[in-house]
Image (spheres, rainbow, N blue to C red):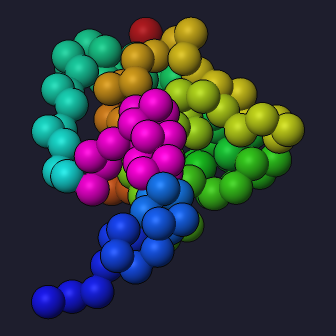
């Protein structure tokens, strides 16, 4: 039998603290985060193209056009290694208060933010070249 430091037998104070932490996590929508969540549906091919353009153009203005860094940090797979995807998606969607990083919630959904985070972790696709006229 393993020892649970949050069990009422271990300490009533710890048990109340543990219950309060679980309630707080639930209020933030974090309950069950350790459980595997189904992957969000990928955006349509047209929307993927728009998101690639947005990241390359808008995000690239701070993170570098090749996403290798600038005003903002590099967004290469090497630079993002070990960073949780949900944390990355949260930063994309909601920004980072107190920093120049804006939230993009007006431009994309949370599922799209997760898709962008996954693409960044995998090596972000290049924007398709337009045919010359």
Query: Is residue 72 rendered to the left or right of residue 16?
Result: right
- x and y, in percent, of residue 121 in the image: 39, 55
Residue 35 magenta-highlighted: no
- x and y, in percent, of residue 94 in the image: 60, 28
The vertical placement of 112 against 108, above or below, is below
Q: Nearer the viewer, residue 116 or 109?
A: 109
Residue positioned 40% across, 17% down in the render: 109
Q: Is residue 125 visible?
A: no
The vertical placement of 100 against 54, above or below, is below
Q: Is residue 78 visible?
A: yes
Q: Which range of residues does the magenta coloring cover?
A: 19-34
Residue positioned 71% across, 28% down in the render: 102
Query: Is residue 23 rendered to the left or right of residue 118?
Result: right
The vertical placement of 29 against 31, above or below, is above
The answer to which quarter of the image holds residue 133 is top left
Query: Is residue 75 rendered to the left or right of residue 27?
Result: right
Residue positioned 50% across, 48% down in the render: 20
- Quadrant assignment for the N terminus: bottom left
The vertical placement of 119 against 101, above or below, is below
- x and y, in percent, of residue 106 in the image: 56, 10
- x and y, in percent, of residue 110 in the image: 40, 24
Residue 23 magenta-highlighted: yes
């Amino acid at each position: 039998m393993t020892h649970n430091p949050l069990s009422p037998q271990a300490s009533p104070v710890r048990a109340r603290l543990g219950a309060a932490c679980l309630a707080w996590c639930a209020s933030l929508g974090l309950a069950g985060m350790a459980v595997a969540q189904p992957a969000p549906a990928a955006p349509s091919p047209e929307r993927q193209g728009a998101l690639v353009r947005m990241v390359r153009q808008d995000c690239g203005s701070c993170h570098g056009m090749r996403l290798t860094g600038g005003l903002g940090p590099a967004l290469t797979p090497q630079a993002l290694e070990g960073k949780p995807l949900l944390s990355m998606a949260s930063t994309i969607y909601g920004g980072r208060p107190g920093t120049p990083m804006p939230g993009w919630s007006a431009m994309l959904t949370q599922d799209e933010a997760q898709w962008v985070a996954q693409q960044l972790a995998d090596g972000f696709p290049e924007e398709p070249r337009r045919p010359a006229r």
